[in-house]
Image (spheres, grey):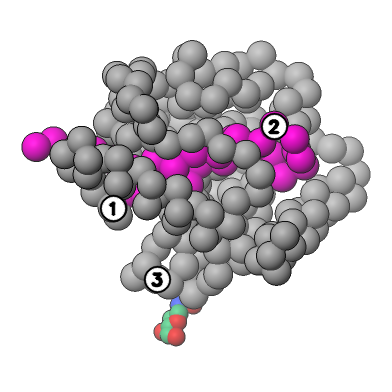
């Protein structure tokens, strides 16, 4: 393992320890572990024991898959500016996790979902981190307001995405960048146009899970 990977594992272990220390392990964390929870997305993308955004596979190609995501998605998102990938992943995860754990205007607990999205935010020299809001919330008005003003709701409005993965391990930003480069090469070869600014690192596995981890890289396809 390189020093960056060691760093990430340490960060994730801290997340795990902090969560385990806090009295009872919340149900949302158990769900993140894959314990309990009967909500499933459609059979599209990695199948995990937490809800994932509904999507349709449009086409499976050699290196990647084209998926259509619905225009009804709501995400709780936070920008962590001036931050390394590891720092932003940690801080951003916590901000979103606190929101679903009850740090909101109704002290409402919201179930954990997957994947966690991390996106480079080059203008802010940091990263955005986002949690998918369970589909039982149909509009933003159905949701409590996050206590942390750094967390807001984001509605991507549906997209056709090219997806590479899933791949395992605990990827660093360099690993994700390499996967994205691989995806771009395949899309260029197929003359598909994409919007680089929409790249997402999608993590389906909890920080506690060490085996059978699943991650993907997504990018929006732009109509020709
Ligand atoms: C990020 O750093 C820049 C310059 O170093 C600073 O102007 C800006 O306020 C910082 N942003 C945040 C959110 O800390």
| Local SS, label 3 | helix
x then y, percent, for residue 134: 52, 28
Instruction: Tell me the distance, in whole angstroms, between the alpha carbons under discs 2 and 1.
Output: 28 Å
The image quadrant of residue 113 is top right
x then y, percent, for residue 82: 49, 75
Counting other residues with Cα less than 10 Å from the Cα at mark 3, is it few (<14), some (14-19), or many (20 or more)? Answer: few
Report the magenta residues as a range: 198-224
The answer to whether any part of residue 67 appears in the image is no
Confirm if mark 3 falls within 8 A of ligand 1: yes
Residue for badge 1:
196
Question: Any magenta on residue 214?
Answer: yes
The answer to whether any part of residue 114 appears in the image is yes
Instruction: Tell me the distance, in whole angstroms, between the alpha carbons under discs 3 and 1.
Output: 16 Å
- Please give the label number shown on residue 124: 3
Q: Nearer the viewer, residue 164 or 206?
A: 164
| Local SS, label 1 | strand
- Please give the label number shown on residue 212: 2
Q: Give me the residue at 30% from left, 20% from top.
A: 59
x then y, percent, for residue 8: 69, 60
């Amino acid at each position: 393992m390189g020093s960056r990977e060691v760093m990430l594992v340490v960060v994730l272990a801290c997340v795990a320890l902090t969560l385990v220390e806090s009295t009872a392990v919340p149900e949302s964390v158990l769900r993140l572990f894959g314990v309990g929870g009967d909500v499933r997305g459609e059979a599209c993308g990695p199948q995990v024991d937490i809800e994932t955004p509904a999507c349709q596979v449009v086409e499976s190609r050699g290196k990647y898959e084209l998926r259509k995501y619905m225009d009804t998605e709501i995400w709780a998102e936070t920008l962590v500016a001036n931050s390394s990938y590891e720092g932003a992943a940690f801080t951003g995860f916590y901000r979103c996790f606190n929101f679903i754990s009850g740090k909101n205007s109704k002290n409402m607990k919201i179930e954990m979902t997957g994947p966690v999205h991390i996106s480079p935010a080059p203008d802010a020299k940091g990263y955005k981190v986002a949690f998918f809001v369970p589909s039982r919330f149909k509009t933003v008005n159905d949701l409590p307001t996050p206590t942390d003003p750094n967390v807001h709701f984001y509605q991507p409005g549906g997209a056709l995405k090219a997806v590479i993965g899933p791949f395992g391990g605990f990827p660093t930003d360099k690993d994700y960048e390499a996967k994205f480069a691989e995806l771009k090469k395949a899309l260029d070869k197929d003359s598909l146009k994409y919007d680089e600014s929409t790249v997402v690192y999608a993590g389906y596995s909890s920080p506690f899970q060490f085996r059978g981890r699943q991650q993907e890289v997504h990018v929006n396809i732009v109509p020709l």
